[in-house]
Image (spheres, helix red, strand yellow):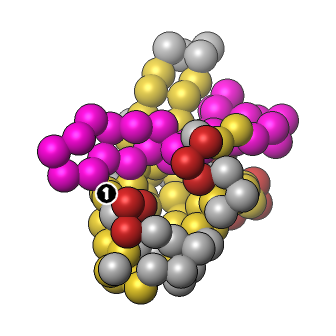
Amino acid sequence: QVQLVESGGGLVQQGGSLRLSCAASESIFSFNTMGWYRQAPGKQREWVATITSGGSTAYVDSVKGRFTISRDNAKNTVYLQMNSLKFEDTAVYYCNARDYTRSSNYWGQGTQVTVSS
């Protein structure tokens, strides 16, 4: 069973930065896409960013220009660099990995990001 372990969340003031990490228990080459989602209190989980096995990236409009997703294949880790954080970025952030060959979809346990106003 694939495990994804997030870290790097915490409390930060508006305008600050955090870097989230997602460490996979196997080579991330095996995943077609890896991404980040978030869920704020009382809201549905929403997609934030995706990076493909080829390195292509995509972002939800609300984080474009502020967040950067990247991957370190040697460390089997995906990152989400979050800059210029806003109060509305407060949420639990979840790492996701998808393997279309195995029709598998994996989730981490989540890490809390709290941005104080």
Foreground residue among 62 and 21: 62
- Please tell me whether residue 79 belongs to the stretch shown in magenta: no
Figure quadrant of residue 5: bottom left
Figure quadrant of residue 21: bottom right
In percent of width and height, residue 96 lies at: 48, 40
Q: Amino acid at mark 1?
A: Val
In percent of width and height, residue 101 lies at: 61, 14
Q: Can I make out residue 66 in this image?
A: yes
In percent of width and height, residue 87 lies at: 37, 68
Decide if residue 97 is on the left or right side of residue 31. Answer: left
Decide if residue 92 is on the left or right side of residue 68. Answer: left
In percent of width and height, residue 30 lies at: 66, 33
Foreground residue among 90 and 108: 90
Q: Which image quadrant: the C terminus?
A: bottom left
Circle 1 packing at 10 Å, graded few (<14), some (14-19), many (20+), is some
Q: Residue at x 52, y 58 (%)?
A: 22
> Magenta part of the protein: which range?
31-57
The residue identified by callout 1 is 92
Decide if residue 53 is on the left or right side of residue 49. Answer: right
Label tally: 1
Q: Residue at x 53, y 83 (%)?
A: 16
Q: Residue at x 63, y 67 (%)?
A: 81
Q: Can I make out residue 2 in this image?
A: no
Decide if residue 38 is on the left or right side of residue 57. Answer: left
Q: Residue at x 47, y 22 (%)?
A: 104
57 above or below 66?
Answer: above
Q: Residue furthest left?
A: 42
- Please tell me whether residue 43 belongs to the stretch shown in magenta: yes
Q: Which image quadrant: the N terminus?
A: top left
Task: Give the SS element for disc 1.
Answer: strand
114 above or below 67?
Answer: below
